[in-house]
Amino acid sequence: MKRVCIIGAGPSGLPSLKECLEAGFDSVLFEMAPRLGGLWNYTPVPGDVQGQPEVHSSVYKNTVINSAKGMTAYSDFPAWEDYPVFMSHEYLQHYMQAYAKRFGLLPHIRFNSKVLRVEPLHSSNRHVSDSDSTTSSDEQSSEPGPAASGCEGSPVSPAPAARWRVTFSSNGVEKSEEFDAVLVATGHHSTPRMPSFPGMDEFEGQQMHSHYYRDPVDFKGKRVLVVGMGNSGVDIAVETSYVAEEVHMAVRSGAWVWPRWLFGQPITALLTRFSAVTMTYAMRQRVFAWLLRQVHGDPAAYGISAPRDPQAQHPTIHQGLYDRIATGKVQMHPNVSRLGPGKWVTLEDGRKLEVDVVVYATGYKLAYPFLDPSLLGPSTNLDKNQVALYKLMVPLTRQALGSLFFIGLFQPLGAVATTSEMQARLAAQVLLGAVKLPDLAVMQKEVADRKAALDKQYKASARHTIQVETPPFCDEMAAMIGCLPSWSSLLLRDPALWSTCMFKPWVPQQYRLQGPGSRKEAREWVMRVVRGYGDNTQVKSVKDLTAASAG
């Protein structure tokens, strides 16, 4: 029996553990916190607003997820009508607890266990070359896996007898254990990316990264400057504007701001199979720009210089920013030029602001301090968020290939949890031997093609190097696993279900209709989740949900 290590008990680690257990592996999940949740494990930051202790979670008191529950919940554990459409971190925490309880995950999780080192036990540590992908007949099977269709060439042979030593600290005691495979599911929102402006050391006010923001009450009566216009920056600016004396936003390149709700439906309802198939990129560009202008008007009227194409950057989603700008509670400005002296901040247009607090909502760097970066290959640059991973999960190095996987290392236009779940299903099938990885050249081409497509669509930024769209990305992996429905067959067999899958909002239960991991309840799940996609009429409080689950 293979022994598998999973690192991180968040929305990516939990399905990884569940899929590995279902595959029959002896599985252990290491979690450094005392409870599960990962990023969504809300942790108050001790000390004042300036204090910056080591803390993994970036979730603040009022965080609400931007993808509807119909897209967010795992494919075999729907979030039913008693959860709100857009869940706060309290609801997500409860949902993940219920998921872990339903599938018996808790006995396999070691809490308060921080992974310090993950080291391969075999000797070679070189990047796989073309010659490495040529294996002898006794090193590889001539039988393709069930999802080998579309994966040309021979499988790549990993280094012989690949095993891993995982060293961790538990209750102050350092220990090591050996595993056949490691799934890294620690996310990529835990190492803040700080900007570099002249005079930062001269500024006499408070400076902090948005990672350490928790509660707007800490900013009562203060003059606040938020640098950056991603989701966290907008959330913080709007929240603090209700209690702060002044709130300013300094923005380098602007953004389109999408509403959570559009025409009475969650914004993610726009993601349908029909629209993905019938609308070209240019059509989507025009349609999305038109829709957003109908909702908010021209961004320039609010002092925001949005790019021409709404698809050229990761979406910023907020229902209230424009109202706060229109009422003077949030003031928009160009980027910072320098800080100091005193509490003054000079902007690129020469204007000056006197502020008490500067919040840098400037994103995150990839960081895996327990891993040797060479295991990810020579093209990897974690500081620039650049990785060369097949399906954004498989390193193409000889030591790591086929036994080291990254789950959740992407920035989705969609939902993290369900996309991570599909990666976890694929990793488990690879470890089980049911799915063979394609030839090295095929994987290298996929990595290069994905990068080229991102470079073409998105503006150059470390924020966009791991961008994916959840439905087509999940389809790619589902095809490999063998759980992508045959749409022509479904049309003949069940036209109503086919129509729902094509024209209604995308839901992950589609991938439980057939193939490995299929569930007899999948049809009912699809129809029920779609019917309740925008329904908030039966929501229960977290307290009531907890009491019901305890009973």
Image (spheres, grey):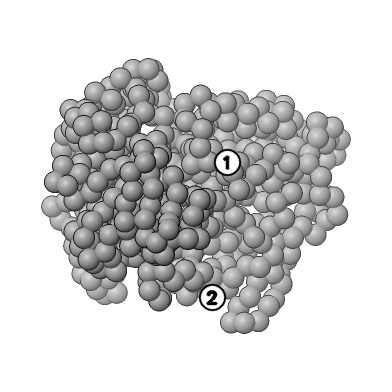
Question: Relative to residue 461, is residue 317 drawn left or right?
Answer: left
Within the image, what quadrant is residue 139 found in?
top right
Question: Relative to residue 373, is residue 183 drawn left or right?
Answer: left
At mark 2, the secondary structure is loop
How far is the residue under mark 1 from the one under mark 2? 28 Å
Q: Position of residue 370 (x, y in %)?
A: 66, 61
* Residue 236 in the image: above or below residue 139: below
Please tell me which residue is depicted at 77% across the width and 53% down the height of the picture: 162
**124 or 345, which lies in front?**
345
| Residue type pointed to by label 1 | Leu
* Residue 271 in the image: above or below residue 107: above
Q: Residue furthest bottom?
A: 172
Question: Relative to residue 13, is residue 77 drawn left or right?
Answer: left
Please tell me which residue is depicted at 29% across the width and 50% down the height of the picture: 248
Please tell me which residue is depicted at 40% across the width and 20% down the height of the picture: 281
Q: Position of residue 264 (x, y in %)?
A: 15, 38
User: Residue at label 1?
Assistant: 392
Question: Relative to residue 202, is residue 240 drawn left or right?
Answer: left
Within the image, what quadrant is residue 102 found in?
bottom left
Quadrant of the frame with the N terminus: bottom right
| Residue type pointed to by label 2 | Asn
Q: Position of residue 174 (x, y in %)?
A: 68, 78
Q: Is residue 472 visible?
A: yes
Within the image, what quadrant is residue 114 found in?
bottom right
Q: Position of residue 472 (x, y in %)?
A: 45, 31
**74 or 224, which lies in front?**
224
Image mark for residue 112 = 2
Tell me if label 1 and label 2 are in contact, CB under 8 Å: no
Quadrant of the frame with the C terminus: bottom left
Image mark for residue 531 = none
Q: Residues within 10 Å of mark 1 (few under 14, many from 20)?
A: many
